[in-house]
Image (cartoon, grey):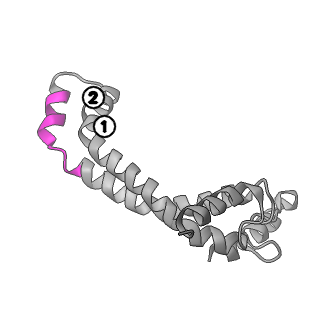
Amino acid sequence: MWVLLYQNDFGLINMSLNKLGLPFLINNWLGNPNTALYAVTLTNIWQGYPFATLMILAAIQNIDESIYEAAEVDGSSQWSVLTKITIPIIWPIILTVALLDFIWTFRYFDMVWIMTKGGQYIQVKFYLRWYLNSFLQI
């Protein structure tokens, strides 16, 4: 699906840019060495965003309301409630999500390989070469 969005000739992104009257922004997103890594990174973020959002939302909803009520009675500002109550309480979940995302990023080799046709561009070539050397050699 993402390859079709980034397609040079008939991709949805380039067609949308053309329809909006911005043909100077049309680009070969996966073929341009300056944009290939960003295109693959955006795809990776898009795929991992729902998990992180749900985990953090569940952590926030799990915080006891009495803590917020006590902060309101004490006259705490919203900023201090966020920085002194909410973030410290959900910090273990934030770290867990960050660690899992870091680990899962290494599973995206196939996406990079398919989208860039083997990483012929220097920005993604490092990632592919590292993966091939690390995990496929015995």
**Image position of 26 (left or right of 80):** right
> Tag 2: residue type?
Lys
From the top left corner, tell me how far across and down residue 48 is, in percent: 46, 61
64 in magenta: yes
Decide: is 10 above or below 85.
below
How many marks do you count on the picture? 2
Q: Which residues are magenta?
A: 61-71
Is disc 2 placed on a helix, strand or loop? Answer: helix
Decide: is 99 above or below 112.
above
From the top left corner, tell me how far across and down residue 59 is, in percent: 25, 50
> Which residue occupies 55% across, 61% down?
134
> Tag 1: residue type?
Ile
From the top left corner, tell me how far across and down residue 132 is, in percent: 61, 66
What secondary structure is the stretch in magenta mostly built from?
helix
Which of the labelled discs sits on residue 3, or is there none? none
In this figure, which residue is indicated by the disc labeled 2? 84
In this figure, which residue is indicated by the disc labeled 1? 87
Decide: is 27 above or below 87.
below
